[in-house]
Image: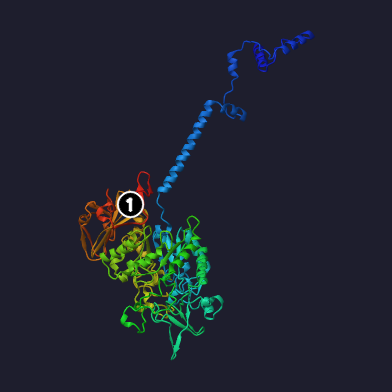
Amino acid sequence: VEVEARSLPMELSEKRGVQNNGFVQNEAFEDEEMDTISQEEMPKTCSVDVDPVAVEETVLKPYAGMPKEVLLQFSSQARYRVTREILFWLVIAASIVLVCATIAIIALSPKCLDWWQASPIYQIYPRSFKDSNMDGNGDLKGIQEKLDHITYLNIKTIWITSFFKSPLKDLGYGAEDFYDIDPIFGSMRDFENLIAAIHDKGLKVIMDLIPNHTSDKHQWFQLSRNRTGKYTDYYIWQDCTQAAGSVLPPNNWVSVFGNSSWQFDDVRKQCYFHQFGKEQPDLNFRNPAVQQEIHDVIKFWLGKGVDGFSFSTVKFLLEATHLRDEPPVNKSQNGVIITAYSQLYHDYTTTQVGLHDIIRSFRHTMNEFSREPGKYRFMGSDDDEKEDIEATMMYYGTTFIQEADFPFNFNLINMKNLSGNSIFEAVDSWMKNMPAGKWPNWAVGSPNAARISTRIGKEYINVMNMLLLTLPGTAVTYYGEEIGMENIASENVSEERINSGPVATLPEKSPMQWDGKVNAGFTEGNSSWLPVNSNYQSVNVEIQSTWPNSTLSLYRALTLLRNKELAMSRGWMCHVWNDSNVVVYVRELDGLDRGFMMVLNFGQESTTDLKAVAPNLPSEAVIRLSTHFSNAGKVVNTKLIKTETGEGLVLEYKTAKPVHTMEAFQGKCFVAEKACYSKALNLLYMSC
């Protein structure tokens, strides 16, 4: 009762009411009360005794599950408001720091290597890789069956040479239909399945495109020879003079394969121009409609999922319109009938003004398919200018106008003799002439050159692969070079058997040697389109995969080293020494306290004193890889490095002073995609 008595006055006071001590039924009291209220502006609060403990019990404290109204009462209190504001500004500050750090990292980070830079390219001649239907010819399904071999090699890019529908003259390089697969290789469904399988394995695929000419069986040519509509000028036609039953060509221009590059057509009664075989008439690229046709072909295959193209024979796309005779190499032959391609300077039939505009237009079309992240489309040009390195470098484009990502480099194939000096000259020639900021590439084999073992000797197979995979840039491996395949004997090649084509380029196209079974595992049929090399029982993938000291095992070790070591995949290359026997160069990356030195012997047994050449080199180095596997892990004295014929060493060493910073080697060092390594942050940056 006492508690209630105490609380009642307090409640009334809070509500600005008056205290009623009881029920009084006297009207005089009501009048008196009303008068009192009217005279006072505000009611007076009665003084009562309040228990402090009781008041304290009524103070509200935070509790779980508070309604919004209660929560808002506390949120406005200073202790909560200040804490909240501090946390808010801390989050804002941290976000700004994070954004700034991200921008700084992006700005300072070097460009990531693209897929065509990060992996070697494996070139496949499809007719010789794997036969899936026992007809003796390699096909697209066969390539799909062997994709695991590509990943086994630590390679992520495949280059498939021409597989268009073709009469197979000149081994299929004259297309009868740019939009179809030759039945010998399979169907369009087979191609689509192959593309899907390649991409499922995280691989990329490049295909050949020869825009210069078509087959004479192509529909365009058939319409052109009949002067049908827009196709009339799709090819290069000229009137020929006929005398005594023979045709006199318009000029002395000669085909790459020899004899006149003009062929009389009985239907049109004119001569058409062909830079290659007479079954391969040249397209007229001065006709805008022809250029558009090729752009449509490019779009078609990119739409099918192809990741890039190698454009072949592009230097032949344009010819001079004046049709003057080309000057003979030997001026005494002036006026004499010339039949060999090498007897003329080809001033009017190659690399004409306007050629690079056409190539840039190809690049522009490919860029339309490169806008999606991770979908960059590679473009290479396959034109071997040989003696004219400056003409080759033009295919890179300029700083502001892009053409090919790189023209394929055949310097190491075109060497006339093998030595440490010739290797140095082949490498140095490319690196010194390559435009700044461009990416190099290297090849030691191709479908049109004898294999390493046949061209320079079996003893150099491993050291050539070591050279290929330790130079900066993209390495291109022709199928079979990873196991050291050799050419087949020319006498085993029958033109009738292969449905015509230049016999001289066939021995290096023999079937891939997969195992020691009949036909080397290439086909389960009775025969193959070309005979298998007789050494297939000892030179094949299956047996070499079990030998730790095989060519295949070394190839895999080199590609793995390339993938794992930053100094090998990007960074500096410096020439240290070369003579008639050896060539020595290093690979370094700023910020790394170790480098790799390659000592490669292309001559006779030799002893090299590298300390005399570069005194700041460490006195000892460890053999990381060797063509003689038993030497791996050994320590060598850099003052006395012995190598045998065909031996190669990859030496790893510690250093605080990289070779490229030494004054003596200025002008001997090259870098394509410059990068520096931060050990503290474990990342790459540009500003070294």
Find residue 250 and report its horizontal and vertical position in percent.
Answer: 43, 82
**Residue nearest the observer in this picture, 685 or 291:** 291
Residue 463 lies, with reference to residue 134, above or below; the image says above
**Residue 472, image quadrant:** bottom left
Residue 542 in view, yes or no: yes
Q: Which amino acid does label 1 sit on?
A: Leu
Q: How crowded is mark 1: few (under 14 residues within 10 Å), some or many (20 or more)?
A: many
Residue 159 lies, with reference to residue 251, above or below; the image says above
> Looking at the image, which residue sits at the far bottom?
244
Find residue 607 and report its horizontal and vertical position in percent.
Answer: 20, 60
**Residue nearest the observer in this picture, 476 or 240:** 240
Residue 553 in view, yes or no: no
Which residue is at 37% across, 82% downward?
A: 339
Find residue 508 and report its horizontal and vertical position in percent.
Answer: 37, 72
**Residue 61, image quadrant:** top right
Find residue 220 and report its horizontal and vertical position in percent.
Answer: 52, 76
Which residue is at 45% across, 41% downward?
A: 98
Quadrant of the image for the N terminus? top right
The residue where tag 1 is placed is 589
Q: Is residue 254 found left or right of 18 in the rendered image?
A: left
Which residue is at 31% across, 80% downward?
A: 331
Q: What element carries label 1?
A: loop
Which residue is at 44% across, 80% downward?
A: 278
Residue 282 lies, with reference to residue 662, above or below; the image says below
